[in-house]
Image (cartoon, rainbow, N blue to C red):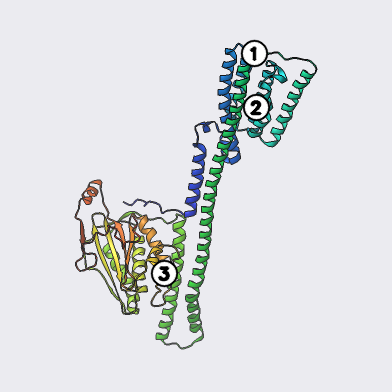
Amino acid sequence: MSSPLKPLPSRPIASRSAAAVSSVIERKKASAPLDGFVHPANLDNEDDLRRARLQIRFGVVLGLMSIAYAAFFLAIGNRWGGYIIGVSGMFTTMVPWVVRQTGNLNLTGYLYGFGLLVGFTGLCSVDGGITGHAVAWLAAVPLVVLLLVDLRGALTWSVIAFATVVALAVCEIFGYRFPTTYDTEWASAVASVSMVGLVCFLGTLGLIFEQTRREAARRMDFANEQLAAANSDLHSLNRERAEFINIAAHGLRNPLGIVTGYADLLRMQENLSPEQIHRQAGEILTSAGRMTDIISNLLDVQAIEDDRMELESKEFDMTPLITTVVEENRALAVAKQISLSMPAVVDLPSVRGDQGAAHQILENLVSNAIKYTPVGGKVKMSVGHNAEMVVVEVIDDGPGLSQEDQSKLYEKFSRLTPRPTGGEPSSGLGLWITRRLAVSMGGGVFCRSEQGEGSSFGVRLPIYVASSEEAENAMKGPAVSFIPGEPLIGRNPMAASRDDIALSS
């Protein structure tokens, strides 16, 4: 019974963009305890989020200070002062709830302005008017509102505060004396507490403003980093698109020219011998095959990146598959006088995965080995397994790979220093596709190579286990079993060594 394999990884740009958006949202939602009062609509704009946080924290601080001052005034017998501060403090403390319910920061800023202006004006009326200590708090209202609302709102409340202070001054000039509702022996204490409180109030407001500004700056930096990463992804995709077009154009041009040329010859020539027809038709078929391979690779890349490649997960036998791939590539090897040898018959356990994808992987590894092996060289295969994986390795005696080449083996459109020895085309996509297919089936690919000493490319695919009991037994099975005489004798194919430069699992 088959089941779908785990999905192939999606495009880098898509995953990065999704991660960036998700990370920004999470940081906005849960960066501070009081952020529970932030309305969801304020999360979409950085400036709105900053102002919402500032207003919420300001309301909490103002509420705590109102409680302290109301208690102080009631303690010294200034009941009117205590009531006024208590009521105005309760009013402004409710503003964060309005922020949570409406998200209208202009409204809540105006509520703060109204509460502060009414409260401090009322306090001035029971604390000696223009000569009292509360007038300094009233004069600070424009600055406070400027930090809480936009410029237009701040100017509005500045005008109102200015008019209120002027009205108090006019009353004083024309002889009206506002009462002082507490015992004059407390005058020094009231003055001291009032000025110290005003300094603490403005200083705390400044600190809250700076804290929210820094948080906004950090989020902006984070967003800029994500934007730079997304921009880099876009540049990479643009380069890949250009490379895609370049490969399609150059890769298809030569074989298409051959097809066109031989087709034209067939059309123009008369009385062709069967040998001539066979030879020219063979060239046309070979060129058409090259074009098909290029197009297939490009389509596979697109299908993998778009998550449209559906692979099966079922039991199949690797041995006949290896035989088929070797026979399919026999003609290519003979054409280059390359000795292509199969492994000896061995009882391999069944593999879990997609048989078509496994065939494509083996085909890629064998054809690559033939492509980069010089005329008269050798390509041989080795197979084996351990308790978890079946391993197939293709060994050639080509030019080998430098460390730099090995570091970019599985990149799309990679250009390696060794070139195909027979002028065969190379799209730079085969190994990228091979790795993605192997990883999607729960396996991996690897390479061991030294410059001038050939290369060994292999694939690991998971052994099929029919039940949980058999899976447990398989994990306790024999260590390693390989074909005598092949390079993998005594070597655990799952063990990463300094030569396994691209182990994927």
Q: CA distance from mark 1 to mark 2?
A: 22 Å
Tag 3, which secondary structure?
Answer: loop
**Callout 1 crowding tier (Cα within 10 Å): few <14, some 14–19, many ≥20:** many
Tag 1, which secondary structure?
Answer: helix
Q: Are marks 1 and 2 in contact (CB under 8 Å)?
A: no
Q: Quadrant of residue 334?
A: bottom left
Tell me the mark number nearer the camera, choosing from 1 and 2: 1
Q: CA distance from mark 2 to mark 3?
A: 68 Å
130 or 235, nearer to the observer: 130
Measured as percent of width and height from the top left, residue 319 is found at 26, 64
Which labelled disc corresponds to residue 111? 2
Location of mark 3 (residue): 416
Give the amino acid type for the residue marked by disc 2 in the picture: Leu
Q: CA distance from mark 1 to mark 3?
A: 87 Å
Location of mark 1 (residue): 80
Residue depicted at 49% across the width and 52% down the height: 14
The answer to whether residue 262 of the structure is visible from this angle is yes
The answer to whether residue 55 of the structure is visible from this angle is no
Identify whether 492 is placed above or below 192: below
Residue 325 appears left or right of 289 = left
**Callout 2 crowding tier (Cα within 10 Å): few <14, some 14–19, many ≥20:** some
Residue 6 appears left or right of 316 = right
Measured as percent of width and height from the top left, residue 216 is found at 56, 41
